[in-house]
Structures are given as structure tokens and as C-alpha cells.
């Protein structure tokens, strides 16, 4: 096999791998969700109360800041519950109290606490964080400095996220 054929073959293999990309998440791993738009992260608002504590966008920190880290618990294929590293009995929640709100709430296992990481399109290394409860995705709102749940919109860059391992 000549050099050109090897390069073409490696290119096809790399392209095929990119086409099948799904975020790699392992149970028990700590992760940050980084906005693909402006590099802020999903952060638990800094206060002691957890039930109903808002999840807010906050500047990404290089160091392992507990309120920016989420522990993945895969409960089905590509279905996760994300616990706060500050207190693992509180999880990322699609609030039943105030629709469209993303909060940290006590773990109870209902659909509104189950999340799917859905690749934007084949070959993309960004994804949506989609609620299994209503299929809405987490969206960054820079103006209000908040995150909310919205219908998926392929052109809305505020709905795109990148996953980073604990640093």
C-alpha cells in the first residue's frame, strides 16, 4: 500500500469516527458543562440552600470548583442524572414548580431529573443537554445571566455545550 492510500484510509477512519461522535461520559466521573458560545459553565448558585437552588452560567474556572462540577450517574444508555459535587443528594432538575427553570433539587429519580446528551449533528463535538421530561434543552441566557429550558433550535448557539472532565 502506498503512502497516498494510507493517508486516504486514515482520513476515512477519522471521518467515520467523527460521524459517530457521542459525548463520552462515565458513571462516577466529574464533569463541567461549558457553553460552546462563550465558555461559561453550569454553576450551582453560591448559597447554602440546595432545594430549588438555581443553576446559573458563571465564568469557567481552571481549577476544580465544586459548584461547577457534576457527577454523572448513567441510569440507561445515554440517560444521566447529574449530582452536584457539593452534595451528591442534590441533582440537576427540570423544575416542576416553575416551568422552564433549571435548578438543583433533592434526588428523587423522576423524569425531570433525567438528561440526555444529544450530539448537535454527526461529526460535531458539541451537544444539547435535553430533559427527558419534556424534551426541552438547556439554553444559556447571557442577558439575564441565567439558564432555562427551551425548545431545541438548530441555529441557536446558546443551546450548545461541550463536556470537560474535572481539571
Image (tube, rainbow, N blue to C red):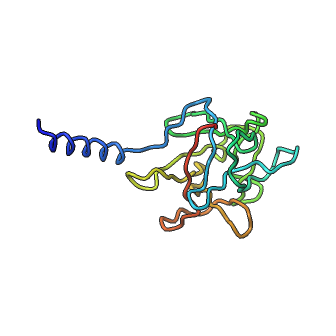
Residue 125 percent coordinates (x, y): 46, 50
Quarter assignment of residue 135: bottom right
Residue lying furthest top? 28
Judged left or right of residue 141, residue 6 is left
Residue 44 percent coordinates (x, y): 76, 48
Residue 18 percent coordinates (x, y): 36, 46
Question: Is 89 placed above or below 4 here?
Answer: above
Judged left or right of residue 88, residue 126 is left
Residue lying furthest bottom? 143
Judged left or right of residue 111, residue 121 is left
Question: Which residue is painted at 80% across and 51% down in the image?
Answer: 45
Residue 10 percent coordinates (x, y): 25, 41
Quarter assignment of residue 35: bottom right
The mark total stands at 0
Question: Which residue is painted at 72% across and 41% down in the image?
Answer: 91
Residue lying furthest right? 48
Q: Where's the C terminus, which quadrant?
A: top right
Residue lying furthest front? 3
Front-lying residue, 6 or 138: 6
Question: Which residue is painted at 49% across and 49% down in the image?
Answer: 118
Q: Where's the N terminus, which quadrant?
A: top left
Judged left or right of residue 105, residue 32 is left
Amino acid at each position: 500500500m502506498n503512502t497516498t492510500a494510507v493517508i486516504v484510509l486514515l482520513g476515512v477512519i477519522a471521518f467515520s469516527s467523527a460521524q459517530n461522535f457521542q459525548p463520552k461520559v462515565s458513571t462516577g466521573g466529574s464533569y463541567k458543562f461549558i457553553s460552546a458560545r462563550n465558555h461559561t459553565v453550569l454553576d450551582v448558585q453560591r448559597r447554602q440552600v440546595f432545594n430549588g437552588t438555581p443553576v446559573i452560567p458563571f465564568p469557567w474556572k481552571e481549577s476544580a470548583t465544586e459548584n461547577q462540577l457534576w457527577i454523572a450517574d448513567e441510569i440507561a444508555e445515554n440517560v444521566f442524572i447529574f449530582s452536584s459535587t457539593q452534595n451528591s443528594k442534590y441533582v440537576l432538575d427540570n423544575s416542576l414548580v416553575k416551568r422552564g427553570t433549571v435548578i438543583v433539587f433533592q434526588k428523587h429519580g423522576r423524569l425531570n431529573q433525567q438528561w440526555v446528551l444529544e450530539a448537535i449533528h454527526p461529526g460535531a463535538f458539541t451537544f444539547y443537554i435535553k430533559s427527558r421530561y419534556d424534551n426541552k434543552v438547556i439554553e444559556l441566557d447571557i442577558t439575564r445571566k441565567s439558564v432555562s429550558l427551551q425548545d431545541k433550535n438548530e441555529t441557536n448557539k446558546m443551546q450548545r455545550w461541550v463536556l470537560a472532565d474535572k481539571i
